[in-house]
Image (cartoon, rainbow, N blue to C red):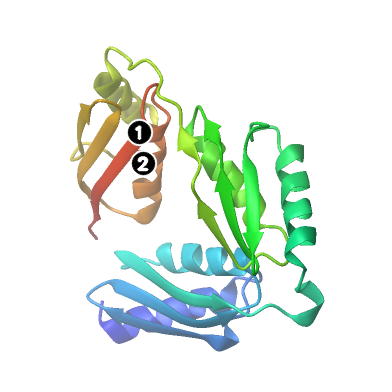
Amino acid sequence: MSDQDLITNVTEELFWDPRIDSAAIDVSAADGRVSLRGTVGSYREKREAKKAAARVYGVTSVTDHLTVDLLDEFSREDADLRGDVLRALTLDVFVPADVDASVVDGLVTLTGTVDWQYQRDDAELVAGSVPGVIDVFDEITLRKTPKAAAVKDDIRKAFKRNARLDADDLSVSTSNGTVTLDGPVSSWAEHDEAVAAAWAAPGVTEVNDNILVAY
């Protein structure tokens, strides 16, 4: 696929997604690597734009240079915004109570300690969905938990169980809670499934993602 074809397809996908106002988004591409520039109206829209670009066939990576330009109706004082973010985190059953948030000029920083990566992911998702948030910085740390005796084998088994993932060409290595994934997959959806499976293993505190999306 030519760069211009990829630009056209990504642009059409952004336009097709009703959650995204793509009028102020510029798309460029080089050898499968897509860059997004311009402005969007919310952090949630920024996140959805990157996801939309990544799911287009032929895209191997997405660099997000989008900035959030809030409408006046969504502009908030930092103290009020922090209160709304904390309330949203409290209402989410997957976010532990010790996750905290600070806000400076609409930029949210999440701190605290959790047991699982999915709890970090959920905290970022919830915080980023609050109106008025410009960006989210995730500084939540993972607790050190006892390393599973066969974490590498557990991850390989998880790969095989997943009907949406063909992981025959992926290699898995582990060291002191760090999992490294190498090899090709055929889509970003498979990439995301593999990374999620690695994070779900007990004792994992870091995942080095060296997966190549190859069409």
Answer few, some or many: residues within 10 Å of disc 2's Cα (few below 14, many 20 plus, some between 14 and 19). some
Of residues 140 and 4, which is closer to you in this image? Answer: 140
Residue 188 percent across, percent down from the top left: 36, 55
Residue under label 2, please give it.
Answer: 195
* Element type at mark 2: helix
Answer whether labels 2 and 1 touch (C-beta < 8 Å).
yes
Image disc number at residue 91: none
Residue 170 percent across, percent down from the top left: 21, 39
Of residues 156 and 79, which is closer to you in this image? Answer: 79
Residue 12 percent across, percent down from the top left: 50, 79
What residue occupies the far top of the structure in this picture? 149
Residue 136 percent across, percent down from the top left: 56, 58
Q: Is residue 96 above or below residue 20?
A: above
> Disc 1 marks which amino acid?
Ala
Identify the image quadrant of the C terminus.
bottom left
| Residue 44 falls in image quadrant | bottom right
Of residues 20 and 109, which is closer to you in this image? Answer: 109
Could you tell me how many numbered marks the image carries? 2
Answer few, some or many: residues within 10 Å of disc 1's Cα (few below 14, many 20 plus, some between 14 and 19). many
Residue under label 1, please give it.
Answer: 198
Q: Is residue 1 left or right of residue 203?
A: left
| Residue 163 falls in image quadrant | top left
Distance of label 2 from label 1 (alpha carbons): 5 Å
Identify the image quadrant of the N terminus.
bottom left
> Disc 2 marks which amino acid?
Val
Of residues 43 and 110, which is closer to you in this image? Answer: 110
* Element type at mark 1: helix
Q: Is residue 78 left or right of residue 209?
A: right
